[in-house]
Image (tube, coloured by chain):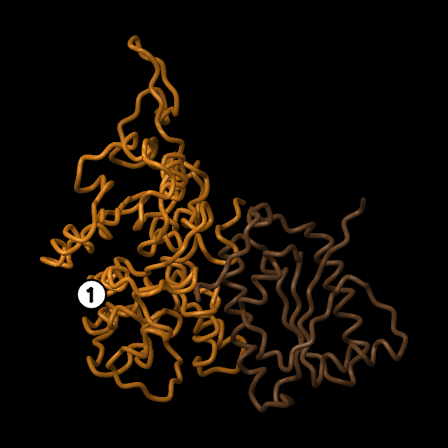
Chain colours: A orange, B brown
Amino acid sequence: MAKPKLGLYWAASCGGCEIAVLDIHEKILDVAAAFDIVFWPVALDFKYSDVRAMEDKSIDLCLFNGSIRNSENAEIAHMMRAKSKVLVAFGSCALEGGIPGLANLTTKDAIWNYVYKESPSTVTKNGGTYPQTHSMMPEGSIDIPEMWETVKSLDQVVDVDYYVPGCPPQPEQIWGVIEYILSGKPLPAKGAVLGATDKTCCDECLRERKEKKLKKFFRPFEIQTDPNECLLDQGIVCMGPATRSGCGALCTKANVPCRGCYGPPPNVTDQGAKMVSALSSIIDAQDPQEIESILDQIVDPMGTFYRFSLAHSILRRVEKS
Amino acid sequence: MAFEPKIIGFLCNWCSYTGADLAGVSRIKSAPNVRIIRTMCSGRVDPAFILKAFQLGADGVIVMGCHLGDCHYQEGNYKTIRRLPFLRRLVKGFGIDPRRLRLEWVSASEGDKFALLVNEMTEEIRSLGPLKLSVHHEIQQPVAHH
């Protein structure tokens, strides 16, 4: 029997998800033995045309990382959807926009203006130029992908079968997912989140939790924290209560608050709204003015609460003013 | 056609909803622009409900609960008094005028206050104009990953 076919792709991402796949170490040889890898731009020399020539649904499993940021990302997302039996949104960016999704805090125009005109390291002539999607050369025309105004998650563009969260997904979780698929056991219901649990990050965190009552928030550099006590108890904004577990609470083990990369827990659509809820319950004040002054201490709530999930949140992007 | 504001009102069952009822039985006239959703407590109003209202086309949201100290569940509205100003910051962060989200206390005997607030809010939203969000043009609804 022919080996099942595996495809991997990166759209708007940093490449960390690809490294995470390689971080399963020698087990990658088991993956190579079990699957026929037919597409993996970061590691193997396949062309888009190779995949386009394949029959629809001929790839058994596609792990797709990265958000959809430009027309090329979208084109390949549609292609991989058509060619794959099972399409997995792999990693925070594919799931919910991830770090690139933070671009939804501003506009394409503002980003381009800074990058191509105003940044101190940019030398411009005649006020600077923007990249053109279409340009004519003596040898013919050149087309490059068009950057979108709004960053999208994979499931806002194509139909997605499963989700593997994390920035990046943890290697042992990745191996767990691959092992499960290789075992031939019946696949879970469509839309399931794999490689994670149904509880919040706090459930895996080893720090000791007490009754929370906060009058002051700190940024991590402002205080020396106790390594055994809950960071939130100590006034550090930790995304644990509004984040799905599965990572093993790695960040809090390293004295760093949870950044929320595993996305919202089950049945929560908006991580930021959940975080507002969680923090509101533990702020120890009843006077409106005192409440406002405590809230002032939480610097950049948008960037903190939606660090990975802005593009997949209820409102998806900041409105242009 | 003239703009008619669509306002979602989340009213707590024990005080504000009864207050709205009193406004009704007392035949107090008020603007018809507030669509009321009854919740058991103002503390039951998940911030996601409010964002969802904006996503689905509400021009404004008003949350009404019992006066502080009167909560049927002892401290539900103390959660609300922190949650709403916090959420207002997030709403502002999304580029929405924070005046579109309001928190008020209305007791069961304050039918007149209910009517006054409804009229006030309606006029305020009318002057702000319709809320236009790019998410309104997206077809798909966000789904919770289960």
Looking at this rendering, what residue extends furthest in the top direction? A138
The quarter of the picture where the C terminus of chain A appears is top right
Quarter occupied by residue B14: bottom right
- Name the residue nearer the viewer: A38 or A312: A38
Residue A28 picture location, percent across and down: 14, 54
Q: Is residue B78 above or below residue A184?
A: below
Q: Look at the picture and state if A180 lies above or below A127.
A: below
Q: Extreme left residue here?
A: A26
Q: Chain of mark 1?
A: A
Residue A188 in the image: state x and y as whole percent: 38, 65
Indicate the position of residue A230 as horizontal and vertical percent values.
Answer: 28, 81
- For the image shown, how many numbered marks are present on the structure? 1
Q: Is residue A65 visible?
A: no
Give the side of residue A221 with respect to residue A108, left or right: left
Task: State whether residue A143 is above or below residue A113.
Answer: above
| Residue B71 appears in the figure | yes
Residue at 53% across, 48% down: A319
Q: Quadrant of residue A96?
A: bottom left
Secondary structure, mark 1, is: helix
Choose between B1 and B99: the one closer to the eye. B1
The residue drawn where x is 36% and y is 35% is: A72
Q: Position of residue B90 (x, y in %)?
A: 49, 61
Residue corresponding to mark 1: A172
> Which residue sits furthest front?
A1
Is residue A284 left or right of A14 when viewed as pictured? right
- Which amino acid does the dot numbered 1 rest on? Glu
Residue name at image x 49 percent, y 71 percent = A292
Task: Please tell me how crowded label 1 is: few (under 14), some (14-19), or many (20+) other residues with Cα within 10 Å.
Answer: some
Q: Answer left or right for A144 relative to A172.
A: right
